[in-house]
Amino acid sequence: MENLVKDIRYGIRLLLRSPGFTAVAVLSLALAIGANTTIFTIINAVFLNPLPVQDIKDLVVVSGLDQNNNVQNFNLTPLSWLNFEDYKKQNDVFSGLSGFIPIGLTLTGFGDPQNMPGQLVSGNYFDTVGVKPAMGRTFLPDEDSAPGSHAVVVLSHSVWTHVFNADPGIINRVITLNNHSFTVVGVSQPNFKGTFTLGNPDVVWVPSSMYQQVLSGTLLEFFESRRALFVNAVGRLKPGVSLLQAETAMKTIASGLAAAYPRENEGRSIKLTPLAQAAIGVNQRTQFTMAGGVLMTVVGLVLLIACVNIANLLLARASGREREVGIRTALGAGRGRLIRQMLTESIILSLLGGAAGLLIAFWGRDLLWSFRPPFLNANAVALTLDRKVLAFTAGISIFTGLLFGLIPALKLSIPNLTDALKLGARTGSASWVRNRVRATLVVAEVALALIALVGAGLFVQSMRQAQSIDLGFETKKLFVMAVDLGAQNMEQARAEQFYLNAIARAKATPGVANAAISSNFPLGGGFLRSVFKEGQEQKPGQRNLLTLTNIVSPEYFDTVRIPLLRGRLFNDFDRRGSTTVVVVNEATAKKFWPGEEAIGKRFTFFSQTEVREIVGIVRNATVFQVGEEPQAAIYLPLAQNFTPAATIQVRTTGEPAGEMESVRKQIQGIEPTLPITNVVTMERQLDQALFAPRMGAALLGLFGLLALALAGIGIYGVVAYSVSQRTQEIGIRMALGAARSSVIRMVIQQGMLLAGFGLLIGIVASVALSRTVSTLLFGISATDPRVFATVTLILASVAFIACYLPARRATRIDPITALRIE
């Protein structure tokens, strides 16, 4: 211990004697470690921070599998409520199986009406996940039995704090939700917001017995249909039951339900996923994991480049310490003692960089989170520098110190005593290419930088492609807003009149070109229904029948600028009592009537006998996410298909931001107590849809530039040091008549030779690694030759400049002065 303290003191004194070197090294490490810590803070919050539930290892998400219908990014589905009830009753592998349906609620009586997210849950929900109340109680087992009999709610701690101002008398207080009175019986423990990591922390839980009071529209209509997949299920395994055993048992029940209800359940099965893995989205985990892996890989490469730089700096400093090491060796210091001293100095340096990196991460995580999309609340994810983050930073700091300090320590710990003890030893003039250690480090640095830059280049180019993708409708000069008339318990006739008035008032607003009603939010998906062509029996086992539906007013296609290809659009004559009609997109026509004319074709939806006739075909439009394959979509006329929740989409003559408030006020005047939410321009909505790829491109681009800068600095440092070590050689060459251009060419050739090896290795490694991220890219190959060529050219140019600057300085050496250097 005494020797360690001496080593630490000596190491600190050495660093203080070289403030320039120390500042450069600490800054390089701070940037690299800070980048790693910032990204790890996000990884920790999203992946490693377990939900505040009891024994999460015993909790699993129960999802459906539909062998006959595969929807993009929706392979695992929720369950129907009736199937969920059967799974709950018939299984013997769960101590509890709970279900919940995400819903929208309107709270009134506390200032302006406000929408807030809610969950309709089974009575055993809190018992199953193991969450105790902070105040009051949770639901009783019988509070989901008799419909409409238990008007009680549990508030999340965030709702209690932010909406009700942490009212200590909240228990037994009556509040109004969707125009119905509910009694608050409990407040959940802090930080619990359900079983979704990125969920809104402001949640109100309602027992399933109150579904008729809080549901409306499609959810209410199909609540008791076995085809309607709304219910997310979470189960707690019984002691001694494995995941595989539970899944096998649940598949057996699924087979029984398929036999008992073949029309609804044929081809459907069950998949179990640990909640710890499914908490970020049972269908999105792979993409989230891959994206996190890409970010950590790139910042890891930046850290490695910084390590190579500092290792080269330490090797450069080592020549100045050869005499010191020689004296210590002559006085009896063993090699192990010398290595320990030098590694101690390196670790001190890396810990200083780690401490500065924590400050950068503290600032960086706040800056990064400030660019989150609007649908994520500020408190949706806790980006805290907790013990795991601090341990990670300390760990990579120590590892980094060992990594960049080991090679110089090993090299310096074997001194040539005769040369080291000579005060007048000449500086070396051997070509720096022959120094295998430093040459290898330069090659590695260039290769790592190229890999990082290729990753950044692919994602930046992917982002550019995503922004240029034709969505099938015009996003400019368009904005949307959402209303939920069902949450107001508004009668259908009154709601239909509201829609007519809303369109009329919006159109009458100066600066508005058109307005329409749509049940679906742009890029927000919609309700999927099974389609059966006329004359086709509605029998089980038929594949790919699920098709997205959208209920729209006649003005919709002109408002969003989806062009008509054949047939006609809706008009005022398409109303109740007339022929039931639909408009479909190209993908629907090709899916159900390939090679045929779809105009005039007729079909039915599952469990309905009403025949619908196709009167028009429109162009495909993006419905789920940017870059998707064309998705089949069926448009239904609003006058024939009522929807209690809808969006109002408005086309303006100029920039929409100036008209949004005017239109909102006009529509609010129709129903003063109606909350109008999600008022946003379509371009902003598109920005939200592209948030993940845009943020990924920005971060990877930033880290790629950092890698490029570090690589350039590293190459420059190595070449500059080599030139300084070869002063005599260069002086002799110039004294013998060597031209300045030949000296420049010699230095650049030697530097670019190593850079060329690094580029070659980096290209090969990048080709192999880039294929793993192909699913995260939009409209671009993972081995896009333009990206590889551009990145290689940029890095080669930086390497050339890094070699040219010290080469030019070498030509200014005075031969006479150089020959006198001892």
Image (cartoon, rainbow, N blue to C red):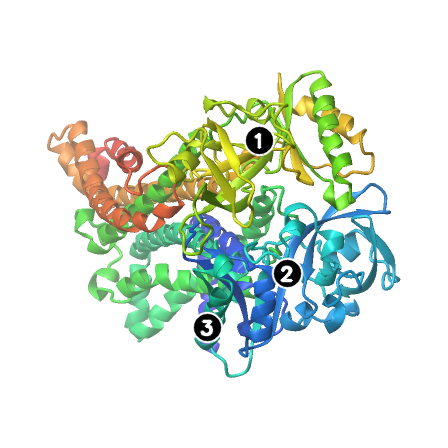
Q: Residue at x 76, y 39 (%)?
A: 675
**Residue identified by numbered label 1:** 579
Residue type of the residue flagged with mark 3: Thr
Q: What secondary structure is marked by label 1?
A: loop
Task: Give the distance between the C-alpha atoms of the residues marked 1 and 2, in whole angstroms.
Answer: 38 Å
The number of numbered discs placed on residues in the rendered structure image is 3
**Residue identified by numbered label 2:** 100
The earlier-in-sequence mark between 3 and 2 is 2
The answer to whether the residue labelled 3 contacts the one labelled 2, judged by CB atoms less than 8 Å apart, is no
Q: 89 or 304: which is nearer to us? A: 89
Q: What secondary structure is marked by label 3?
A: helix
Q: Nearer the viewer, mark 3 or mark 2?
A: 3
Q: What secondary structure is marked by label 2?
A: strand
The earlier-in-sequence mark between 1 and 2 is 2
Using a 10 Å C-alpha cutoff, classify the residue at mark 2 as few (fewer than 14 neighbours), some (14 to 19) or many (20 or more): many
Disc sitting over residue 252 in the figure: 3
Looking at the image, residue 324 sits to the left or right of residue 605; the answer is: left
Task: Give the distance between the C-alpha atoms of the residues marked 3 and 2, in whole angstroms.
Answer: 23 Å
Using a 10 Å C-alpha cutoff, classify the residue at mark 1 as few (fewer than 14 neighbours), some (14 to 19) or many (20 or more): few
The answer to whether the residue labelled 1 contacts the one labelled 2, judged by CB atoms less than 8 Å apart, is no
